[in-house]
Image (tube, rainbow, N blue to C red):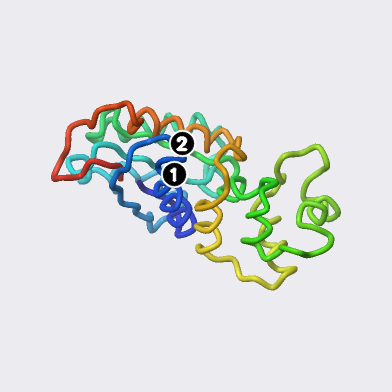
Amino acid sequence: MLVADKNMEAAVSALLARHQALGIRAIRWEVFVHPARDPGCLRRCHDFLRAQSVNFEHALVLFDRRGCGSAESASTLETEVENRLHASGWGDRAKAIVIDPELEVWVWSDSPHVDEALGWTGRLPGLWHWMISEGHTSRVATKSSDPKRAMEEALRVVRVARSSAIYGQLAGCVSFERCRDPAFLRLRQTLASWFGTQKRRGRPSNGSTGAT
């Protein structure tokens, strides 16, 4: 798997470790961080992953729409990236997941684990009430309109530094059913189609049977 930053690396590593919750078999994987972050994943992922096409069954490219340098829709960007990967030797074994607007949209849910990870357990007002009062969301919304800024300000209030460990902690414990973000659902569907428990293992290459 190729991702845009260390926060994504921590999140997807924790997600993939929960293979039973994902409904997939146990797999081996590697996560690479592109040095050019989101724009690099968009524009140069095919070059980065070209040599890996003989080492892994599948590849996933994950990055934020906000910050990638393109105003195109997430679905258009996914198609663009997948076309490049297809032409670089991956064929139909690679997929792109573009998070709109950014990874932090996966953070926000009504799970008590979010309060715990962000340092808000036991505080009054609670985290969600604080978000409403600060204008980060509304009583009827299911997520923040600016999820990254909301997370940064929530951490600033309790004087907790934003770190990759927080993303890994959340991905390791929050119920997947609480996240209805389209990119997250596409990620789950892609993994299930490749590694579902009822599927047989595809062609192994150099001993690797997972995804990069």
The residue under the point 70% across, 43% down is 143
Give residue 159's position: percent from left, percent from top: 69, 73
Mark 2 and mark 1: span between their CA atoms? 9 Å
* Corner quadrant of residue 82: top left
In primary-sequence order, the first of circles 2 and 1 is 1
State if disc 1 and disc 2 touch (CB < 8 Å).
yes
Label 2 SS: helix
Helix, strand or loop at disc 1?
A: strand
Query: Which amino acid type corresponds to the residue marked 1 in the rendered image?
Result: Leu
Extreme residue in the right direction: 133
Quadrant that contains the C terminus: top left
Nearest the camera: 93 or 47?
93
- Residue 175 image offset from top left, x and y in percent: 57, 44
Residue 80 against residue 5 in the figure, above or below: above
Please provide percent x and percent y for residue 153: 72, 62
**The one of 149 and 142 positioned closer to us in this rendering:** 142
Q: Identify the disc placed on residue 187.
A: 2
Q: Give the total of numbered labels.
A: 2
Residue neighbourhood size for the residue with mark 2, other residues' Cα within 10 Å, grouped as few (<14), some (14–19), many (≥20)? some
Q: Position of residue 148 (x, y in %)?
A: 64, 54
Front residue of this view, candidates 156 and 87:
156
Residue at the extreme bottom: 159
Which residue is identified by label 1? 62
Q: Is residue 35 left or right of residue 173?
A: left
Q: Answer left or right for 63 relative to 47.
A: right
- Up-down relation of residue 90 to residue 135 (above or below): above
The kind of residue tagged 2 is Leu
Query: On the rendered structure, is 124 left or right of 39?
Result: right
